[in-house]
Image: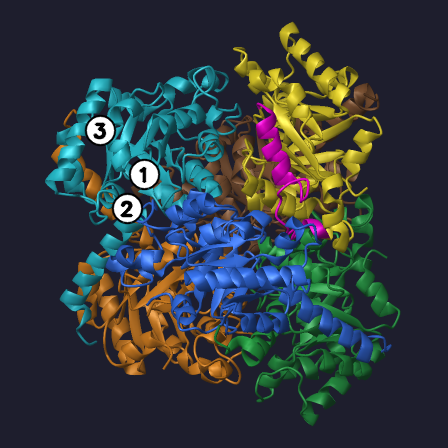
Chain colours: A orange, B cyan, C brown, D yellow, E green, F blue
């Protein structure tokens, strides 16, 4: 199976996912060399567009990570371009019901399962070129985000849509949607209960669940609840965290000492 | 004084310097918001060129950091473009003697002190526009790198060149030049002795010294030796450090647990 | 209030708006230093896309202008990206009715007022970071364009949609829609009558009105009718105007004289 | 003759030259449509590099202007790239003597006149492709800048270098070099006397002279002194001039009126 | 008629169309100089976005080809931007019925025929500027792709939509849609019969038909069936073909010989 | 040995080299997949700069080709950046004598053999990271171009410079330098005699020779003379060749047939 992330998830293991907001092939290849199982170009809230996605993918290709994309919206034009560009999976925001999940699956799947248009200009070079189109429907991960009350309510119908591989939870939007503040690494029993419900539904339908996290510790906890695709922060957030820690240490240990 | 880094150094304080290898305005503005005193666009070994430097500067302008550039080589064309683009200081690699220091100062200083050509297309917008050219010679930092045996031997003649503001030490190249392995945060007595010698020469000439460091702890130690401009790693290095730590924690605490 | 344009409009003053068609951070920062109250990146008819918008915003951040975006179309993906990128207002073309206005407001407003997804990657750095999401619904300007017969006919229902801040008139498209030629600075009584009607409706609903103009004189006249957000040409148009005037003067006064 | 600027100069006419600091093909093509005889991409003080030069040239090719480049420095690598990219003339800063002029001519001229390397990747498409290399030495304008005391003193030896087509005066750097403030459109008798001297030397050697100007009126005056290549400001300066005039008129006539 | 491709088609001639997947103005201008009647920037499956389209158009403007765009999806925002950017025709994927064809025509046509918004920022410079808007509806080619069973079934209603100029066949998607493998240059009688049916319908409605081909020979055959707009491969495919042929010849004739 | 090209040359085999003028990661990765032994980014006459070189390298990394760079000029700044960016060899134009060859070797070699500065920001990721600096001097190919009479005359002293790996012949510049027209695939006995002399000198010094060719047939012939690094055209030239052949066939076989 060309999609190593899918294989790892199928084997029951938890996967750790990097997240790219910086529109640079160089920072992408540095991230890709750090040990993530998959790396996602975030075209929704990251400073990314189609061309920066392509550059990130080109720069990451030599590393054994699975490239994913979060698209800015559930729109077939950009979903198709992301897949043609080399994505092995699509995370799509704000899925509320089966109709939206079906539209996503249609955009991700070739006929007869869907309506994706043929032209995998970079993707076909990944596996055996002539066979990409025959295996893509089995390889590509189709991952709607569950982050609204409607999405929670309709989880069973969403997961019943053919082609849907799993779900991805956006904790800050889910909180926002429920009248809470928009943060990650949530501890409200209400939210944790929803996670349990969604995981149970995934288990029932034979699908996996992923979640965005603000820290490695919380992400690790989530694997014990059953989440298999766990993102930790993003590239610029990790950079800022390390930079602030270094500056703080410098100021404390030596920075205030006059020469 | 528009150049806050120069003022801070003049006040006897140590400064912590960020280092940009990622050619992205977005990562630059994130770095610029972390608390550095100055941030340097590295056009020598970073993935930077003139246009990415401009984008980094534009994105950092709203933050209270002093922008610097390490030029790829001691060449008047790129030195002028870096200053016109808004740099308040130039770090120039591999300075071996007074003639090279003089060429650098000529490229950085307007007449009558030097030969810099007039045209501060972005720099003039920093201070009071009409006065930039009358104060630039006082504001701009001219910083040759000392990283070869010749540079060490000729430190006094280099520091005697009018216009030179201070020096910046490249520990890995200095080690390489002396037959050692090219690393940062060196502990060889030979090297530390050279640092002492260079700092003493700077003190004698009324100049400051800076150094590139691989960790906050070592950088803090260097301030106690007398270094006032201390860089810690670079943007992509800090990002990779945080990413690897997060992945390691994830794998240890939870990543191996099957869903 | 972080949004100075909104505050100025609320105080009853007229505002002059710059318009960016050139996809360059440098021309954007030059424009931003000219004295406009706000500057709009035109992603519909300008040579702009998301990445050039980000570069323009980064380059303008140091100037006291309010950044706006005209999106290419009323589509939630690009509206969200423009706001996350730092826009304090969205001008959206071709609004015909309340349903379209509601879709726009939903894309611009966080819950519970709308459906905007959380992730203000650059916007949160503007005000107090942790509070952006709590104030954004009050700060962001939501501005549908009225430029079709349907939009004119449905102005009251459009202005009744919660979240709509005001309207922006596109005179050339409005003329086109009514069977006239597509020009700015119109003098037809029919059109001026429509402007009066739209302004009256805005006044009734407590909303402001803006308009695109081809000259400063006409824009000034429009403030006397009651328009508070008045654009004058765009960057490339202003440049071409000045260039042609200079060339004409040169040719007339001296250019034809042989050396 | 493919180089229309050269032909126009040879016919004794004055030419008006546009100047590009904005690194955008779009603003370049707008400028190129305004009526200039030639348009120069300023790689020294403009926000331009090699790739933006190529984009400007591509965008201007359909317009009947002659494309020129001011290189960042008298360095054969960038001179060759500018000519290969399609420039029909090179303006090179800070020429002080015949040796520097000779180095410039060598970089601009094919053997046997110079040492330019063959590979006119875009330039050959301008004229008849197979003949570019046989006519380039006759077509390309080689224009050292005279802007230092040394350059003034050595004007005759500079103009005696085979291949030099004319000179270009940088008034602000010339003033700086002479201890004056760096401005354009100078009125000091000392400077005007230097202009006369340089023009006389050009006339003696059968070469033309150009000059950078801040206004159309001054540029027109210069044609009467004998200057044939007269630049007026640059793209961003013209844009800012028109923008500020429009804003001032708006504020005066209507901008202060409350709605 | 400014649109030379439309004129050539109207005269009954077959046209050969180049196809750009490489996002580079330079490769675009090289392609444009090869002799194609028209050149299409492929924003659907090519590595193209809006800015690369503009650069390709700028670089091709000097060549006598008609620029077209295949948009990523039938969405009015990008259709408008492509036309404003200078496209003389829009090829839009996956048209299934008259409603979709009508939406496409609305996006391509100015009032009263459609709903295109006025602002031809680059397009107006092509013909006589002030007249662009009066002739655009006659000049612009509106070309839905027929590549699904639904599109085939509804060909007559699609061709009956006012404003539709012709159709373009995507053989690989058509095959996919019909349960066949996705290839070009098809020989299945079923497919060839569909081509005949579609051509007959075009003839009946006075419209033209185009088709994407993998080889010049097949494209030539298609002209004999009646196709008038025949694409051959794309830029990167042609490049790879020539590269592989050269390498094969080198390896065979000499490459294995040791020095 | 990480440098597969060097190993292949050392084994006595001839190598075929691709040449990139198109500044696009996408066209680079397509070229890299065609079967070349090495691929050279041409920063001298190609439309390439440092950032496009990095993008080409990132996109080619997954393919088993050895990446080389032709630098625009023998200047240590750009040589260092090309090597740090990942080049395994430097082709440097217009080498005339041992001093120039020595300067090139100094820029390419780490101490103690040369003066290259440490900072292999992308190169170190190729082999085993921590060992790059210890093996780079053995791996990197240092290849001066011989293309002037002086270079031919001084071939023995050039090849005697420590660190020089081989030479690369530029046939068009060599012809130009000798008073001939600048073409590839030369047949003049004078030139072929020079090739023999240069090859003999290389053999004597244990170095290899390369040459730029316009066709596969001529390149194959050159291997029989002893050339081991044979370039065939470049990316855009191969594309244009295939495009013109396709158009010619189309016009001949079918293009003139009316529908």
- The residue to which callout 2 is attached is A240
> Quick one: label 2, few (<14), some, or many (20+) residues within 10 Å?
many
Query: Can you tell which quarter of the image residue A172 is in?
Result: bottom left
Left or right of residue B22: residue F259: right
Q: How far apart are marks 2 and 3 (CA)?
A: 23 Å
Q: Verify CB contact (< 8 Å) between mark 2 and mark 1.
A: yes
Left or right of residue E259: residue C224: right
Counting from the top left corner in percent of width and height, residue A24 is at 42, 53
Q: Give the range drawn in magenta.
A: D96-124
| Chain at tag 3 | B
Left or right of residue A249: residue F227: right
- The residue to which callout 1 is attached is B33
Quadrant holding the N terminus of chain D? top right
Counting from the top left corner in percent of width and height, residue D100 is at 57, 29
What residue sits 83% from the left and 69% below the top?
Answer: E9
Left or right of residue B91: residue D187: right
Rendered position, F87 above or below B259: above
Rendered position, C209 above or below F230: above
Rendered position, D17 above or below A123: above
Label drawn at residue B135:
none
Does D118 appear in magenta?
A: yes
- The residue to which callout 3 is attached is B228
What residue sits 53% from the left and 44% below the top?
Answer: C69
Counting from the top left corner in percent of width and height, residue F90 is at 45, 55
Return the residue found at the far left.
B189
Who is closer to the viewer here, E200 or B240?
Answer: B240
Does F152 appear in magenta?
A: no
Badge 2 marks a residue whose secondary structure is helix
């Amino acid at each position: 199976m060309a999609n190593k992330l899918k294989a790892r998830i199928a084997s029951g293991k938890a996967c750790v996912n990097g997240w790219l907001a910086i529109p640079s092939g160089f920072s992408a290849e540095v991230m890709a060399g750090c040990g993530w199982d998959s790396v996602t170009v975030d075209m929704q809230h990251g400073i990314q567009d189609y061309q920066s996605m392509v550059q990130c993918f080109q720069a990451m290709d030599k590393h054994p990570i699975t490239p994913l994309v979060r698209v800015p919206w559930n729109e077939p034009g950009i979903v198709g371009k992301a897949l043609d560009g080399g994505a092995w999976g699509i995370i799509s925001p704000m899925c509320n019901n089966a109709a939206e999940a079906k539209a996503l699956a249609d955009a991700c799947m070739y006929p007869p399962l869907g309506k994706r248009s043929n032209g995998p200009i970079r993707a076909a070079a990944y596996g055996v070129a002539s066979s990409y189109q025959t295996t893509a429907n089995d390889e590509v991960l189709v991952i709607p985000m569950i982050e609204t009350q409607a999405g929670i309510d309709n989880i069973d119908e969403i997961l019943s849509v053919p082609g849907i591989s799993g779900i991805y939870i956006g904790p800050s939007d889910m909180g926002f949607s429920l009248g809470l503040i928009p943060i990650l690494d949530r501890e409200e029993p209400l939210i944790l209960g929803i996670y349990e419900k969604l995981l149970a539904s995934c288990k029932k339908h034979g699908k996996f669940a992923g979640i965005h996290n603000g820290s490695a510790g919380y992400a690790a906890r989530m694997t014990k609840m059953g989440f298999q695709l766990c993102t930790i922060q993003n590239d610029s957030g990790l950079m800022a965290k390390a930079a602030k820690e270094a500056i703080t240490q410098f100021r404390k240990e030596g920075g205030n000492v006059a020469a």
